[in-house]
Image: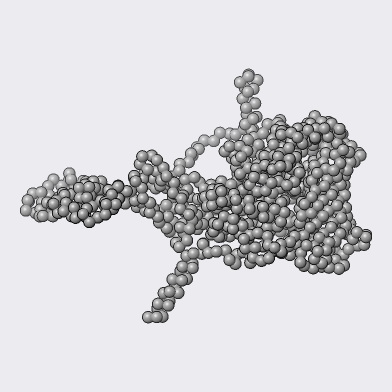
Amino acid sequence: MKKHLYLIIFAFAISSLSAQTKFAQLGQELPTANAYRTASGAPGHEYYQQKADYKMDIVLDDEKQRIDGFETITYTNNSPDQLDYLWLQLDQNLFDEQSDTKLIEIEHMENFKSVGDLRKRDFKYDGGFKIEQITNTSGQAMKYFINKTMLRIDLAKPLMPGQNISFQVKWWYNINDRMQVGGRSGYEYFDIDQNYLYTIAQFFPRMCVYNDVTGWQNKQFLGRGEFTLPFGDYIVNITVPADHIVGATGECQNYATVLTAEQRKRYEMAKKSDSPVLIITQQEAEAAEKEHAQKTKTWTYKATNVRDFAFASSRKFIWDAQKQTVGNKDILCMSYYPKEGNPLWERYSTKLVAHTIKTYSKYTIDYPYPVAISVHSKWIGMEYPMICFNGGRPEADGTYSEGEKYGMWGVIIHEVGHNFFPMIINSDERQWTWMDEGLNTFVQYLTEQEWERDYPSRRGPAYLIADYMRGDVNGISPIMTNSESIKQFGNNAYGKPATALNILRETVMGRELFDFAFKTYCQRWAFKHPTPADFFRTMEDASAVDLDWFWRGWFYTTEHVDIALTDVKWFELNTQNPNLEKDFLQKQDAGKDVFIGATRNKTAIEQTINEKDPQIDDFYAKRNIYKVDTLDQQAYQKFLSNAKAEDQQYLASSKEIYELSFENIGGLVMPLIIEVTFVDGTKKVERIPAEIWRIQEQKVSKVFIYDQPVVSFRLDPFLETADTDLDNNTWPPKMQPTRYQLYKQEQIRENPMQRQQRLEKLENGN
């Protein structure tokens, strides 16, 4: 007996533990809190980070498309650890012929659709860094070793805590043609005027991050996992053809020597203007395109407390700027673009930069840098401190599709937004793409909605991720997957985390709690190196909302949301009044469905035996079960004399009671949002927290009591949970029709602006 009881108790304990898996606290999934990173999600009292300062001289050779560089790096060891060697990133080695990126790419011939695809695959050029020397500041050679995209410097003596070291690197590399080999930076050649537009980044050997989480973050650069970098101060001299215009991270220190008096005058006007001011006009840029200066100019830029540096250079640049006030500080917002970007870029780019800086500052921290720059280049979208490279190019005739316009708007907002994630809130992109792209895409959505009402955002709203989440699980990765191992990169690293944050804000936490917690995270980790655990813990710490179930489901699994409304039971209270109850019973019986045989027998059978013989029917056949008799009345009177007045009143109130049953088909638990439509046409929304699933994860039920009958129930009426099957969300069941097209017209390849021009010519008889 005791043994059996023990087994029953043990089995119940195991069953209960299993049933609460989705709501178990994140334990082993998160690192143990310590003096560097607290359990609250804040930096600990012993938190540290390294510092890397750069002084560089860069020469851009416009004839050879080559960068030559010389840098002095001063590296400060703020860690408690002795460092015997240093690690630097050599990102340009991605383009080396023996790059791992090329070797590990899975290829199928069916993916090559044209000769152009094969030519691009077969295109070769001498890429990668050419390191000429690494010395200390006295000119003595330092021992180093290159491991693909990483470079190790072996120190003659250890770098102790609190010490710094300065060393010098001389290098060069051939700039990649982005149109041929791709890449986040490089050059675009314009055959029509024989000019180049350079967007230059990852152009110098850069220090890796050393921290309390990974030690040296020296994972090889394979292309997807982006850049993890320490903060520092930069002074960079950039020598380019004399007729080039340069935009770069930081503030130019010598506009007086590189700009004309008229350009400087316009620049000063722009610093005070609330709308874009042209510093270099399209007419001036077109004139510059015709000249190819042989002389050079050197532009000097200075940037403080940034994690990287990038620049753009071309004689094709139109340049405009305006100010945007954030807090008590004026930010200079600027755009550089060739004539090929107009009319879109002159009309929108700088205004989008200003709007993005203002909106992101509201949701995160005030933008701390003096400038924010958007540079136009075909196809690319890439971000660096204070500067980003963005696509969005009209047709040659100046027309553009609506999609091109929204694509340009979206990429500028997104890339300018990256100033906050990860340029300031400096997460480890090499490991966790979602902390960079996902958080940024979420705030991008908020910014787009404040730019244009009902802006058609590509990512953010819950319903937009449903197709991805209902897909084949073999093609889906958990969000918490290393950057290089992600399947469906865009959906996983951009769309799903942005959707998750939207659901937290709109459905799980509410805007006030979410916005406070999110801003707290941004403030805590500005100019620091946060991890996923720091984000998860801060969001809970600042809101008092237990979100472990949410992180577990949305970030650690590939489950999806499919909650079905499987059954609705309708009850009305028995009033105990025989007149009402027997009348109800009679109407209920009269409304029952009748078997077809009974219906046909009414005419097929002329007369039954009991109809012929009056002796057949007895008491039961003759009684009227709907008749109210004296005994019924006496029982009712007895009930009235014993029942409380409030109970009698409640029974007489005609309450309508519904029991709703729900099934978790997709596996991902979520709140239940139920829209109730009543017989009089009014509606009510019931919101049940996700914790209703805490005991029973597969099936739950809930009782609702109303003052009038319900005509329909609908789950997720506002498309806020990413439910992947809306057809099982309604009672009575309701299917969504789709339009089937039998005939398809031949489509003319033109954008709507071109169609309108064609229509106007037709109507004018041309």
Q: Can you give x and y, in whole percent of width and height, for residue 283 in the image? A: 80, 29
Q: Residue 82, relative to residue 64: is it above or below?
A: below
Q: Can you give x and y, in whole percent of width and height, for residue 530 in the image? A: 68, 57
Q: Can you give x and y, in whole percent of width and height, for residue 753 in the image? A: 64, 30
Q: Can you give x and y, in whole percent of width and height, for residue 741 in the image? A: 50, 38
Is residue 199 left or right of 576 when viewed as pictured?
right
Is residue 476 left or right of 274 when viewed as pictured?
left
Is residue 257 left or right of 703 when viewed as pictured?
right
Query: In percent of the image, x 44 and y 71: which residue is there?
Result: 12
Q: Which one is in front, 319 or 230?
A: 230
Query: In percent of the image, x 83 and y 66: which residue is there?
Result: 159
Query: In percent of the image, x 68 and y 60: which residue is there?
Result: 43
The answer, for residue 60, to whether it is visible in the render is: no
The answer to which image quadrant residue 681 occupies is top left
Query: In percent of the image, x 30 and y 50: which residue is there?
Result: 650
Name, please, the residue furthest toward the right. Answer: 139
Name, please, the residue furthest toward the top. Answer: 765
Q: Which one is in front, 762 or 146?
A: 146
Q: In which quarter of the image is the N terminus?
A: bottom left
Q: Residue 8, relative to residue 764: is it above or below?
A: below
